[in-house]
Amino acid sequence: MTLAEAAAEAERLAEQGAETDLARLRAQWGEEIEAAARSGDYRERAIAYRAIGQFRFRQKTELLRRGLEDDSPACRGSALISLERLSRDGPQPVNQVRSVLHRLASGDENEAVRRLAVVCLRNGSPHRDTIGLLQGLAEDERAGRELRDVAAKVAQGLRRRAGPRG
């Protein structure tokens, strides 16, 4: 079984709520994920970063942080997908890397990475600086239409969650 196959199985187990089987799979593949994340091949690193979210590996958020800084847009995107997945249950994973997400959303050279960073910010706490950044992106005529649209939508959701203080 490859790491990608094991990650797909982990995703299936997580969706079924089979925590015992998922924990067993995590124990079996944890070191493999670490090794793949250090690979010289960006494709292996991308699979590893994506697997962290599929395995629901909350203990590997520091490894995801490294993925957010990777030279490869595929790796940054995979790390963002995992970060978004891990942050659905609470804002802590996003809040821990908020400044990195701000940088990616506002300045990454890859438009898809920028959109994924914005989507991740949706699951974080509704900080005023994040809302301001997203509003600025939504109004930036130089940004792509999809990025502006998602930034506007996420900013609106965060403002709503912030209530009168936001």
Image (cartoon, rainbow, N blue to C red):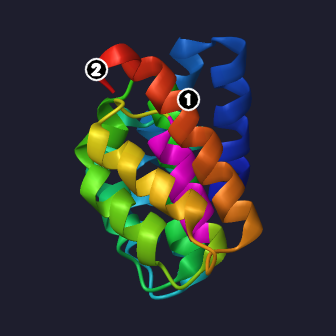
Q: Earlier in the sequence, mark 1 or mark 2?
A: 1
Taking the spot 65% from the left edge, 60% from the top edge, the residue there is 148
Graded by Cα atoms within 10 Å as few (under 14), some (14 to 19) or many (20 or more), the crowding at tag 2 reads few
Taking the spot 72% from the left edge, 43% from the top edge, the residue there is 8
Q: Position of residue 14 (x, y in %)?
A: 63, 23
Instruction: Name the one closer to the observer, 154 or 64.
Output: 154
Residue where numbered disc 1 is placed = 157
| Helix, strand or loop under label 1 | helix
Instruction: Name the one closer to the observer, 116 or 74.
Output: 116
Q: Is residue 161 visible?
A: yes
Specify the segment rendered in magenta: 113-122
Predominant SS along the magenta part: helix
> Is residue 114 part of the magenta span, yes or no?
yes
What amino acid does circle 2 point to? Arg
Q: Is residue 51 visible?
A: no
In the rendered image, the quadrant that contains the C terminus is top left
Q: Is residue 29 above or below residue 71?
A: above
Q: Position of residue 105 (x, y in %)?
A: 47, 64
The Cα atoms of the two marked residues, 1 and 2, are separated by 14 Å
What amino acid does circle 1 point to? Gly
Taking the spot 50% from the left edge, 21% from the top edge, the residue there is 160
Residue where numbered disc 2 is placed = 165
